[in-house]
């Protein structure tokens, strides 16, 4: 995989490499042999090449997925915060950064049987992990160099497309896991077929051995049986001859008394010879029976072997059918993966167009941003001016509060003076006149203070109104006292006149 570590590799190169690897896989799958043995030999010869193509296809697929996630992650990182806040109102799902841990789990935690599949092909999963780590680092640098022109992207379109592509990638990974499980089942079936083939070859060799031995043993046995039958006939003839000889010897014994001893010796020797021939005959009969039993056993073994051979041929034909069906399924899956790859190519092209549109939109948003920054500076300047005015108003308000407090104190003093004046009403009219003039002056002063208070802050008008209400109340009290005093004074004048 040294060629994938080159940072100059682009998306089109990876797609072309995927096309070539898929074509090579299809060519390897579609090749057929004349016989089952040739097919099995072709399969075991080209199995490592097929495994290497599958590994390369898987690495290229994973690199494309990692490149896509890296591009979308860089786009989200480079999107301005105001665009992200606008996009978050439309889609809250896309506001999160791409989960790299899920990507690692999805690409690193592949199908359960894929490590077994790689190990069966002679590649360990640890070596593949180290290679994939190198590929990830090189692909990160590759994505930064290839996608430097698309480092900003609209969050609304990126989020929806990213979620759709992630779902599609998950579906493709599930299909790849199914394909890997089918590959494992195919490997197991191939192992079973190979075992059956070896067993069949052993049985065929044994059958040929039996077929080569059986005719010879049958011929030998038949010849031996015929020889034994001939020997049996000769023995029976000799036995008959010996019986006749015995009869003859007995007759001679009866006729020839003096030579009886010699004849008895001949008789004994003849009887011994007869007993030996009888024992030989029994032995040959037993051997003939044993040979017939062995012939029957060989015939039964041959029939059993014939049945086993027929069963093996049926299993081999079934295995050929299953292999052809699995090849058809693999071809369908490869065509489906090709369609999915074409769909991913169209999606990537669409994403490129959207990235270009996002670049133009980003330039426009930067112009708008500069205008808004100028307006913000102007508003900041106006805000500072308003803060100065507010501080002035606060100072004026504190001054008015001090004046109101002084007026309250002054009103308290007036109230005390008013009480003293009420006490002094009976004593002196001058004091009443002075109080009247003093009250007029106070009214003028209160009216002046009222005008000053009305010119104050809007927030203290309620306090001024209440102060006016209190002044009106005191004035009414003063008027009532004055009227009472005037009435009392008028009552005193008639009394004095009378």
Image: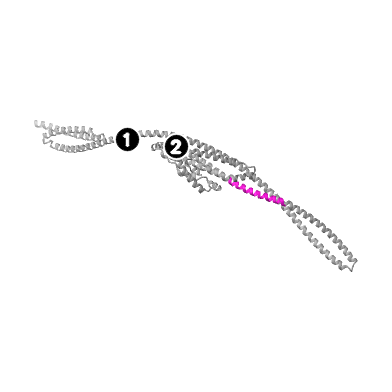
In space, the residues marked 2 and 1 are separated at their CA atoms by: 33 Å
- Nearer to the camera, 292 or 42: 42
Asked which quadrant contains residue 444, the reply is: top left
How far from the left and from the top, in percent, is residue 194? 62, 47
Horizontal side of residue 415 vs 19, given as left or right: left
The correct choice, above or below, for 306 with respect to 86 in the image is: below
Which numbered disc flags the more N-terminal residue, 2 or 1? 2
Inspect this view and state whether residue 352 appears. Answer: yes
Magenta part of the chain: 186-213
How far from the left and from the top, in percent, is residue 87? 41, 36
**Which structural element holds mark 1?**
helix
Inspect this view and state whether residue 498 appears. Answer: no
The correct choice, above or below, for 427 with respect to 197 in the image is: above
Mark 2–mark 1 contact, CB under 8 Å?
no
Instruction: Report the quarter where the C terminus lies.
Output: top left
Residue at image coords 80%, 62%? 276
Residue under label 1: 377
Horizontal side of residue 362 vs 16, given as left or right: left
Colouring mode (rainbow / by chain / secondary structure / one colour): one colour
Residue under label 2: 158
């Amino acid at each position: 995989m040294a060629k994938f570590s080159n940072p100059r590799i682009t998306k089109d190169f990876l797609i072309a490499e995927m096309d070539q690897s898929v074509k090579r896989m299809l060519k390897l799958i579609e090749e057929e042999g004349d016989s089952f043995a040739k097919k099995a030999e072709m399969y075991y010869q080209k199995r490592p090449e097929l495994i290497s193509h599958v590994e390369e296809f898987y690495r290229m697929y994973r690199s494309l997925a990692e490149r896509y996630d890296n591009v979308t992650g860089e786009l989200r990182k480079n999107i301005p915060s105001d665009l992200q806040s606008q996009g978050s109102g439309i889609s809250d799902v896309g506001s999160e950064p791409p989960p790299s841990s899920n990507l690692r789990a999805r690409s690193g935690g592949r199908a359960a049987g894929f490590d077994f599949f790689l190990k069966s092909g002679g590649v360990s999963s640890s070596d593949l992990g180290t290679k994939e780590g190198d590929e990830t680092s090189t692909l990160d640098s590759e994505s930064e160099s290839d996608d430097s022109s698309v480092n900003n992207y609209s969050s609304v379109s990126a989020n929806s497309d990213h979620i759709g592509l992630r779902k599609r990638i998950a579906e493709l990974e599930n299909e790849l896991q199914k394909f890997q499980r089918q590959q494992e089942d195919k490997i197991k079936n191939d192992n079973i077929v190979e075992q059956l083939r070896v067993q069949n070859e052993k049985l065929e060799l044994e059958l040929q051995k039996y077929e080569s031995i059986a005719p010879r043993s049958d011929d030998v046995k038949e010849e031996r049986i015929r020889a034994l039958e001939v020997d049996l006939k000769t023995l029976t003839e000799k036995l008959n001859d010996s019986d006749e000889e015995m009869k003859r010897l007995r007759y001679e014994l009866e006729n020839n008394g003096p030579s009886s001893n010699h004849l008895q010796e001949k008789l004994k020797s003849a009887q011994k010879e007869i007993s030996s021939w009888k024992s030989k005959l029994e032995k040959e009969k037993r051997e003939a029976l044993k040979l017939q039993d062995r012939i029957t056993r060989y015939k039964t073994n041959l029939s059993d072997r014939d049945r086993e051979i027929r069963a093996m041929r049926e299993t081999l034909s079934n295995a050929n059918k299953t292999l052809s069906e699995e090849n058809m399924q693999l071809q369908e899956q490869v065509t489906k993966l090709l369609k999915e790859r074409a769909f991913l190519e169209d999606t990537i092209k669409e994403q490129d167009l959207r990235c270009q549109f996002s670049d133009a939109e980003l330039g426009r948003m930067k112009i708008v941003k500069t205008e808004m920054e100028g307006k913000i500076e102007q508003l900041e300047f106006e805000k500072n001016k308003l803060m100065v005015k507010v501080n002035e108003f606060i100072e004026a308000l504190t001054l008015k509060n001090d004046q109101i407090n002084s007026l309250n104190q002054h009103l308290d003093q007036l109230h005390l003076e008013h009480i003293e004046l009420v006490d002094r009403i009976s004593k002196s009219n001058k004091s009443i006149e002075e109080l009247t003039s003093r009250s007029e002056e106070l009214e003028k002063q209160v009216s002046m203070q009222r005008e000053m208070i009305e010119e104050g802050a809007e927030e203290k008008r309620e306090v001024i109104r209440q102060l006016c209400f209190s002044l009106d109340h005191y004035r009414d009290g003063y008027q009532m006292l004055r009227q009472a005093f005037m009435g009392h004074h008028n009552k005193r004048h008639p009394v004095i006149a009378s």
